[in-house]
Image (tube, helix red, strand yellow):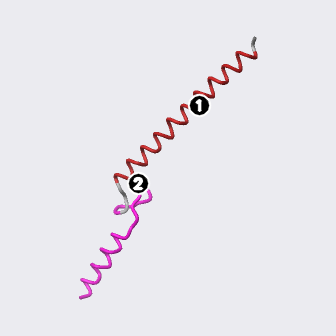
Amino acid sequence: MKRIFAAIVIASSLTSCATTGDPSEGGLFGWSQSMSNQRIADRRAMNSSIQADTQDKWAEARRLNNQLSR
């Protein structure tokens, strides 16, 4: 009887864990591949946005520099 109760407690504790896409936070049972893929896609999108913004700033700096040198 105690073994059945222990098995139920262990099973319910494993299923009640929140999943995460970050393997450093999720542990062995709380990690989700789909959440990890979404996390990677979000980071790539943010990186692309930052790169585009950086290119815009460099273009603006070149334009302003050209105006100053005239």
Q: What percent of the width, then of the height, locates residue 48? A: 49, 35
Q: Amino acid at mark 1?
A: Thr
Question: Closer to the camera, 56 or 1?
Answer: 56
Can you say whether 28 is above or below 10 in the image? above
Can you say whether 55 is above or below 14 in the image? above
Residue marked by disc 2: 21
Q: Quadrant of the N terminus?
A: bottom left
- Is 8 contained in the magenta span? yes
User: Residue 54 shows which numbered tag?
Assistant: 1
Q: Secondary structure at mark 1?
A: helix
* Left or right, 38 with reference to 51: left
Residue interval drawn in magenta: 1-29
- Considering the whole magenta stretch, tell me its main secondary structure: helix
Q: Residue furthest bottom?
A: 1
Q: Amino acid at mark 2?
A: Gly
* Left or right, 51 with reference to 37: right
| Residue located at (40% from left, 65% from top) | 18
| Residue located at (53% from left, 36% from top) | 49
| Residue located at (29% from left, 81% from top) | 6
Crowding near pointer 2: few (<14 within 10 Å), some, many (20+)? Answer: some
